[in-house]
Structure formats: structure tokens, C-alpha cells
């Protein structure tokens, strides 16, 4: 066990865990923030996507000892009033079916739009290829990202 | 207006009202947290009145509707309450939806399976709404001393025609709650629907996009421990022994033990290859995961270790000998084939498929000496309770089963072994536990879609009329044939045979069971036969349906040829079939399953030699479309899912071990592989609605294969299409 000080959604937290504990399980088990999902545990499905200093990372494969002083943002902290352009677009396009992968999809899309505010179809596909959706909502995901990009421009 | 006699249901409603007084919610706060759907309902309700099993109304007029069936992403949590709200005649924005939990006295068929929720709920849910509206009106009539026939309702307000009196439902709810349900209930004429047929957003949408706890894996309870299991690494192996002490000293680990999880009396939903497991219980997920990795278990042989090569040979052998008796026989097929001018014969195959729900299997259990709470993602809560009662030695009425939203089902959560495992582990450690599967546990544990093969033969006469048709289907643990489906009924000489090959690899229902294979094979073959007959593939199919309409062969055909032909005609018109589109290669397919009819045209282009689906045109006849928004989403998703599994899906085995155990080795369709565009057209016929969770998936595999043929000149017979030379199984 070791003590770690991490910053999640603007708030400081002190956590006593083994250093190899992935950020995903710190969020879910220790901070009661369950919006970030467990899907594969090997950074292949994207369900656990969070932002680390604005970059999309797979929290299932990021040990807490590597988080350091980075700013972690999760789906719970993406916006204060659920009004990020992507969240609004997700509702407008009624994207989710089962909904399980969607927090990861939104977080990944948010990182994409912050570095590329007006992505082409190809750029959206490339950026979103690491986020699996078994329900097959990809068409709506792409449409919602385009709507959000327009909103933000 | 449809008049429905309630007598049959009257008793259950009466029972409900008497039982409901004391609050009928089995609740946990985060699941029942009810936020008004609209800001316009600013008043916070002080009191709620149970009107019946589906409806409670607040003093403010806010309405809670319980959705009785499990939600796996098929969106019934939105569409089922829409049926209630329609007949209750309330404004949808004043409706809050809550998940109903297992209660066989209040609800019937609480199952997510077979695309049947809407079809089965169509009458009962509307009746629940209509009978509630009626007692509310009677309460107002009694208060005003006027005949109920002089009252009207609109958006939750009751008005008296001959005076200016009006009252909202909340004001008469307390009086209404004690009234008896009248014998006859009038249901609306579909032309008067205001909610049914209107595009309505997912009721959990806001919670999903903000990461609120909704799913089984999100569930927590005070004092809860985390449990994981280790199952044998190969089908055909069992536990020999292990040294628990090697991991018991690891941080946070509370117990390591062997656990027996099978009920004495098995139901169909208890399919499970590994009833005996190693269980590890600890404080946090990561601690338990580490112990699971560290624990060395010795295994021993229990039966045989199967491999895909062996499956392939066994399926081929079964395919080459007749079944003991035919599933269906019309006319004299052998004679027809002998006299044929042309015979076409092809074999199609597809591999085992894991379900791969994005939320891995998990369940919460709190088992004490007297009772049990089981909470989590389950498509068959009633079956789970029955088997848990058997396993735990507790009466069923001492077991509460609560349903969380599910991160996908696709048939996997029909088989509740993970619920029983959680229960057995909780009982053993005498503490509440949440069992979590890793992705590897989930993907290698079984209950797969069986591997299948099918041989089709068609006989054409000199006029290119289809005179004979044979199909012999084989599969692991289950044959794929539906005896009385198309083209049965359209061909005078017809033979269907169904066979299975035993396997110790557990198999079960997977989104559109059997149809998910047979549609792709059949509709690819029909395309090839049409070509051999020199006919347009749509016209060829329409000719066959014409025969089934005018002069059907046999009496047991389980489809309506007019509706079947209807979706084909609609897609022919909408897609502009027959018009030349440079660079675009088109394929067609049509299929009927789960009571709905679907026809599709796929347009593909070759980009750098790779097929890219540019557009799917899809016509659907599911009768009345309850929620067009959710319906189109289901249809789109089913087609993306079908393309994904047809192109890339498959699990193979060597010595009983699954070769694929996570998404680094298993290809689930990704964003860039999805179709660029989809357009859906519904047949508007006013027929009672049928489900959409499954029907769009099966035919798309053939529409894709037929368009690939147009693009490449090569027919596709072996799934997954994207991997050459893969063995079946």
C-alpha cells in the first residue's frame, strides 16, 4: 500500500492503494465514480476512457503510480450541467442502446474535438476506432460528433 | 375504438390494488431516484398513489410508470411505458419511468428475449393505462356527481363537458386508487394515438451520458465484497486442486475456495459448462484480480478436449448423411431433382460466436440464512429466482431479484449461471458480494452461438421454375433449421433436415438464434439460384411469394407471403433497384423472424480493393411502430452487428481452449467498418406491433455477401468473410 494524491475533475483526493492499481479501479472502487466502465482490462475496447491532461487514455491500463499530478477528467466531470456539446448531441441523436460504452465514446470524442475541432469523417473513424460498441451505434456516434463539432465552431 | 374485456385480467388488477397500498417498490435509491422529466413540473410530490401495477400518480399529477421487462439496450424501458402513457392519456414529459423488478404476481413474461416484449405487452400495457384512466375518471365523476360519460381527458386533465370543472389526475388519485377496475375497457383507435408512433428519446439517455450508476457492475451496497471466479481453462476439464494459502495472504484477500453453483434440478436457462469453480473474495476489484492471476490451479480431464478441426470434420460427416426423419417433406424431392434441367448445390458455414456484451457478466448477491437479494443484469429474472431457490435451499418468496440496466444481452444473460455463482459465493462467505467476470472469463466461458453448416440444393426445370428444394442443416448441439419457413410453401417438392453434433462446448441463444446463420445462408443461396435461373433476384423472390399467396404448398407455413413480398416491393421502389449506379455494387436479402419482416439492399464500393458499405436501404414490417426513434436505432444496430459478425466474428478451439479470449484477438466491428449511411422505411399497415431487437440482423449477412459477389465475382460461403481459410468451429 502507498498513498497517492490525485486530482480528479478538479478535486484533490488522497488514496491508499497498491501502486499498480489501475486508475479505473481507483475511480470505481475508491472514489465511487462508476461512469468510467470496465470492458476488457487491456486497453482494447475504450469503455474506460478518461482524460489525462486533456488526452484520452485507457484508465484500465494506467497504474495510479503513473498519474502523478496530472489532471484527470472523467465523464462525471466533462461538464457541470451535462451540457458539453457532445452530451447534448448524444441526446439529440439518441445515440445509446445499452449505453455501457457511451461514456468512453464521449470522452474519446471530447479529446478528439479539443485537438481537432472540425474532423473529417475519416479522422472521426480513425480516432474512434479504439472504442467498441457491440450494439452497433457507430453511425449515430459519428453523426453526433459532427453535430457537436458544428455547435462548438 | 377497441373494446377489451378485462375479466380475465380483472382478478390480477384487484390483487394488485390491495397489495399495492403499502408501497410496491423494491428499491435501491440510485435506481429509483426519480427526477421529473420536465422542469415544468416544478412541484416536488408529497404523496404517491398506486393506481395499479404499472402506474403511480403523485399529488402533483406527476406519473411514474414501471417498465416491467429487463432492459438490455432494446429500449423497452422507453417503449413499454409509452404504451401505458398513451392510454392513460398523460403528457409524456410528466412521466418518470422506473424499472419494475421481478414480481410474477404483478407482471407477466418478464423476459428480454425473442423480440417479444412489445408484442406481448401491446394489450396488457395499454389496458393498464386505459383502466387507470377509467378509475381516475370515475373518481372525478363521483366527486362532481356527474355521469362518467360526460367526462373527457387530455394530457392528465379530466374535464366535464357541460361545466367548466376540471381536475388533474393527481387530485383524484387517492380516490381512484381504491376503485375497482370496470369490466370493459375501451382502448384508443390507433388514429388517435399521440405518444405511440412519435419519436421518443431513451428515458435513460441523460443518465448514460453523465455516467450515473445504472448497470449491474455499478451496483454497491454497504459491506459488499468483491468476488471473482476461475473456471477451467478448457472445455472438458475440471478442478483437481489448488493451494489457497498461496494467495490468501495477499492484500485484501478474504477467502479462496471451491464452489458448486449448479442447482439440483436444471432448467434450460442453467446451461453452463463449468458449474464447479474456484472463487476468490476480497475487498477491492484490483486486489482480487491480482490474486486471481497469482493463484495456480491444477486441472484434470473430465471429458474430451475438442478442437475446431474436429468440429469441422464432425459437421461435414453429419452433413453427408440423411437425418433419421425429415423436419419437413413436401412432394417427391428426389424425383424432382432427377428430372431437373439444372441443379445448384452449395454448402454454407459459420463459426461459434461469443456474445461479448460490453458489460462483462456480473451479479450482486446478499444471501443470509433466511433470505436473499440478487441484483444485476439478467434477461430471465424468474428463471434465476427458481434456480437460486433450488441452489440455496430458500423458498422463492424469500428471494428478491432486482434488475439493473444491462450493458448488452444478445442472449447471453438468458443463462443466469453468474447470478447463481454470486449467490453461492455470498452464501459461503456470509456477506454481500458482487461477482465480476474479467473479459477473458466472459469470452472463454461458453454459451456460444453454435457453429453451423448447411447444404442447400435447388432444382430448376427447363423453364427455370424452382421445382425442388432441399436443405440439410447441422450444428454443434443444435441444428439451424426452421422447418416451415420460406422457401417452404413456395416449392412443390421440398425436404428439410435438421441434425446436431454433440459437443461439450456450451451453446445457447445468440441474438436471433438460428436465424442469425440460416438467413445469411438461405438468402445467399436464393441469390445464386435466381442467377442460375436468369432472373432478377428481387423478381425471383417475388415470383416465389406469388406462388405462396395463390397456391401455397402445405398448410404449416409460418410466414405471411404478402407481408414478405411487401417489404421486398417497398425496398425495390425506395432503393431504385435496377438503376445503374457506377462504382456501386448492390445485393438484396429478405427475411422473416421474430414476427417481423425485413428486406435490405446493400450498396458497396471497393476502396483500395476493400469493400466499403456506402449505404443500406432497409424496409421493415413490424406492424405499428411504437417508437420510430428507438426502432430505427435497433434496426441500424442490428445491421451493424450482423455485418460485424458476418465479416469478422468467430471463436475457434484447440484442445478445448478458446483461441480468442479478449479484444486483442477477437475482432468486433469498429467505427471505421460500419456502414456510411442507413435509411429505414416502415410498412404502414396498422397491424399490432412486433419486436425489433433481432429481425434486422439475420438478413444483412446475405445482403452483404450478395453485394460482395457483385463487386468481386466471388460468392461467399464461409463466415467470417474477412478471414480466408478459417476452419469452422
Image: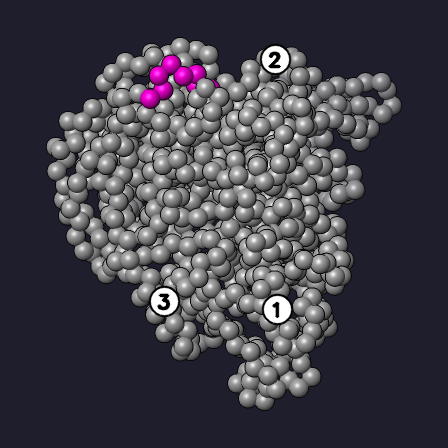
Tell me the SS state at disc 2. loop
- Camera-side residue of B365 and B471: B471
Q: CA distance from mark 2 to mark 1?
A: 61 Å
Q: Which residue is mark 1?
A: B527
Using the rendered view, name the quadrant where residue B305 is placed.
bottom left
- Find residue B312 and name its label: 3
Q: CA distance from mark 1 to mark 3?
A: 26 Å
- Camera-side residue of B174 and B1: B1
Tell me which numbered mark, 3 or 2, is placed earlier along the sequence. 2
Position in image of residue A132 (x %, y %): 48, 40
Quarter of the image where the C terminus of chain B is located: bottom left
Residue B207 appears in view? no
Instruction: Name the chain under label 2.
Output: B
Position in image of residue B697 (x %, y %): 56, 53
Q: Residue at x 35, y 16 (%)?
A: A68
Q: Is residue B184 left or right of residue B641?
A: right
Give above or below for B61 relative to B693: above
Q: Pointer 3 and pointer 2: residues touching (CB < 8 Å)?
A: no
Q: Which residue is mark 2?
A: B44
Give above or below for B143 relative to A43: above
Does A82 lie within the magenta span?
no
Tell me which numbered mark, 2 or 1, is placed earlier along the sequence. 2
Amino acid at each position: 500500500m502507498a498513498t497517492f494524491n490525485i486530482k480528479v475533475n478538479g478535486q484533490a483526493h488522497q488514496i491508499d492503494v497498491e501502486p499498480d492499481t489501475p486508475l479505473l479501479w481507483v475511480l470505481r472502487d475508491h472514489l465511487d465514480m462508476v461512469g468510467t466502465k470496465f470492458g476488457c482490462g487491456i486497453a482494447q475496447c475504450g469503455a474506460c476512457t478518461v482524460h489525462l491532461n486533456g488526452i484520452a487514455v485507457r484508465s484500465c491500463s494506467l497504474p495510479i503510480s503513473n498519474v502523478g499530478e496530472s489532471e484527470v477528467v472523467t465523464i462525471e466531470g466533462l461538464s457541470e450541467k451535462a451540457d458539453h456539446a457532445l452530451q447534448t448531441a448524444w441526446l439529440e441523436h439518441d445515440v445509446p442502446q445499452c449505453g455501457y460504452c457511451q461514456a468512453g465514446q464521449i470522452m474519446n470524442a471530447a479529446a478528439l474535438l479539443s485537438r481537432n475541432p472540425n474532423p473529417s469523417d475519416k479522422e472521426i473513424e480513425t480516432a474512434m476506432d479504439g472504442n467498441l460498441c457491440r450494439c452497433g451505434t457507430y453511425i449515430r456516434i459519428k453523426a453526433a460528433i459532427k453535430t457537436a463539432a458544428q455547435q462548438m465552431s | 375504438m377497441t373494446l377489451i374485456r378485462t375479466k380475465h385480467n380483472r382478478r390480477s388488477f384487484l390483487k394488485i390494488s390491495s397489495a399495492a397500498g403499502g408501497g410496491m417498490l423494491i428499491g435501491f435509491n440510485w435506481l429509483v431516484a426519480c427526477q421529473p422529466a420536465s422542469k415544468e413540473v416544478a412541484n416536488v410530490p408529497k404523496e404517491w398513489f398506486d393506481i395499479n401495477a404499472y402506474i403511480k400518480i403523485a399529488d402533483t399529477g406527476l406519473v411514474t410508470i414501471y417498465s416491467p421487462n429487463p432492459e438490455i439496450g432494446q429500449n423497452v424501458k422507453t417503449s413499454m411505458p409509452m404504451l401505458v402513457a398513451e392510454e392513460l392519456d398523460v403528457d409524456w414529459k410528466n412521466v418518470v419511468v422506473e424499472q419494475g423488478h421481478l414480481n410474477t404476481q404483478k407482471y407477466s413474461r418478464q423476459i428480454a428475449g425473442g423480440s417479444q416484449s412489445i408484442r406481448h405487452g401491446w394489450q396488457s400495457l395499454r389496458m393498464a393505462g386505459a383502466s387507470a384512466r377509467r378509475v381516475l375518471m370515475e373518481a372525478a365523476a363521483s366527486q362532481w356527481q356527474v355521469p362518467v360519460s360526460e367526462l373527457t381527458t387530455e394530457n392528465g386533465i379530466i374535464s366535464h363537458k357541460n361545466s367548466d370543472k376540471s381536475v388533474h389526475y393527481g387530485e383524484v388519485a387517492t380516490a381512484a386508487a381504491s376503485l375497482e377496475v370496470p369490466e370493459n375497457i375501451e382502448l384508443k383507435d390507433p388514429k388517435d394515438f399521440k405518444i405511440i408512433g412519435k419519436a421518443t428519446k431513451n428515458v435513460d439517455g441523460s443518465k448514460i451520458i453523465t455516467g450515473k450508476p445504472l448497470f449491474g457492475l455499478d451496483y454497491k451496497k454497504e459491506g459488499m465484497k468483491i468476488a471473482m471466479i476461475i473456471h477451467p481453462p478448457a472445455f472438458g476439464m475440471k478442478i483437481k486442486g489448488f493451494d489457497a494459502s498461496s494467495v490468501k495472504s495477499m492484500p485484501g484477500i478474504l477467502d479462496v475456495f471451491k464452489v458448486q453453483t449448479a442447482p439440483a434440478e436444471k432448467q434450460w436457462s442453467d446451461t453452463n459448462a463449468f458449474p464447479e469453480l474456484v472463487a476468490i473474495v476480497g475487498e477491492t476489484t484490483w486486489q482480487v484480480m491480482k490474486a486471481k492471476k497469482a493463484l495456480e490451479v491444477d486441472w484434470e480431464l473430465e471429458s474430451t478436449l475438442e478442437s475446431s478441426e474436429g468440429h469441422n470434420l464432425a459437421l461435414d460427416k453429419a452433413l453427408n448423411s440423411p437425418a433419421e426423419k425429415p423436419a419437413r417433406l413436401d412432394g417427391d424431392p428426389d424425383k424432382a431433382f432427377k428430372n431437373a434441367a439444372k441443379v445448384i448445390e452449395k454448402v454454407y458455414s459459420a463459426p461459434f460466436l461469443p456474445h461479448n456484451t460490453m458489460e462483462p457478466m456480473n451479479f450482486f448477491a446478499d444471501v443470509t440464512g433466511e433470505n436473499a437479494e440478487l441484483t444485476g443484469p439478467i434477461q430471465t429474472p424468474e428463471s434465476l429466482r427458481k434456480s437460486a431457490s433450488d441452489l440455496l435451499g430458500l423458498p422463492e418468496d424469500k428471494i428478491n431479484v432486482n434488475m439493473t440496466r444491462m450493458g448488452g444481452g444478445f442472449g447471453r444473460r438468458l443463462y443466469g449461471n453468474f447470478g447463481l455463482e454470486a449467490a453461492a459465493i455470498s452464501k459461503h462467505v456470509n456477506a454481500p458480494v458482487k461477482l465480476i467476470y474479467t473479459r477473458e472469463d466472459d469470452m472463454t466461458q461458453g454459451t456460444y452461438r453454435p457453429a453451423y453448416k448447411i447444404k442447400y440444393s435447388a432444382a430448376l426445370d427447363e423453364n427455370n421454375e424452382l421445382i425442388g428444394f432441399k436443405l440439410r442443416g447441422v450444428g454443434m448441439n443444435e441444428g439451424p433449421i426452421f422447418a416451415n419457413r420460406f422457401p417452404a410453401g413456395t416449392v412443390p417438392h421440398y425436404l428439410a433436415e435438421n441434425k446436431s453434433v454433440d459437443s461439450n462446448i456450451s451453446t445457447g441463444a445468440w441474438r436471433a438464434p438460428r436465424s442469425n446463420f440460416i438467413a445469411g445462408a438461405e438468402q445467399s443461396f436464393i441469390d445464386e439460384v435466381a442467377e442460375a435461373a436468369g432472373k432478377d433476384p428481387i423478381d425471383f423472390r417475388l415470383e416465389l411469394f406469388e406462388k405462396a399467396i395463390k397456391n401455397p404448398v402445405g398448410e404449416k407455413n409460418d410466414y405471411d407471403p404478402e407481408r414478405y413480398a411487401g417489404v421486398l416491393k417497398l425496398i425495390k421502389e425506395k432503393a431504385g433497384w435496377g438503376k445503374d449506379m457506377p462504382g456501386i455494387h448492390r445485393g438484396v436479402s429478405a427475411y422473416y423472424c421474430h414476427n417481423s419482416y425485413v428486406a435490405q439492399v446493400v450498396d458497396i464500393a471497393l476502396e483500395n480493393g476493400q469493400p466499403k458499405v456506402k449505404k443500406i436501404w432497409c424496409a421493415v414490417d413490424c406492424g405499428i411502430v411504437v417508437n420510430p426513434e428507438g426502432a430505427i436505432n435497433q434496426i441500424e444496430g442490428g445491421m451493424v452487428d450482423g455485418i460485424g459478425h458476418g465479416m469478422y466474428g468467430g471463436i475457434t478451439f484447440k484442445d478445448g481452449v478458446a483461441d480468442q479470449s479478449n479484444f486483442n484477438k477477437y475482432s468486433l466491428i469498429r467505427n471505421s467498418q460500419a456502414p456510411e449511411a442507413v435509411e429505414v422505411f416502415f410498412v404502414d399497415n396498422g397491424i399490432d406491433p412486433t419486436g425489433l431487437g433481432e429481425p434486422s440482423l439475420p438478413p444483412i449477412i446475405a445482403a452483404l455477401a450478395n453485394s460482395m459477389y457483385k463487386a468481386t465475382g466471388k460468392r461467399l460461403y464461409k463466415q467470417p468473410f474477412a478471414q480466408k481459410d478459417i476452419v469452422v468451429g
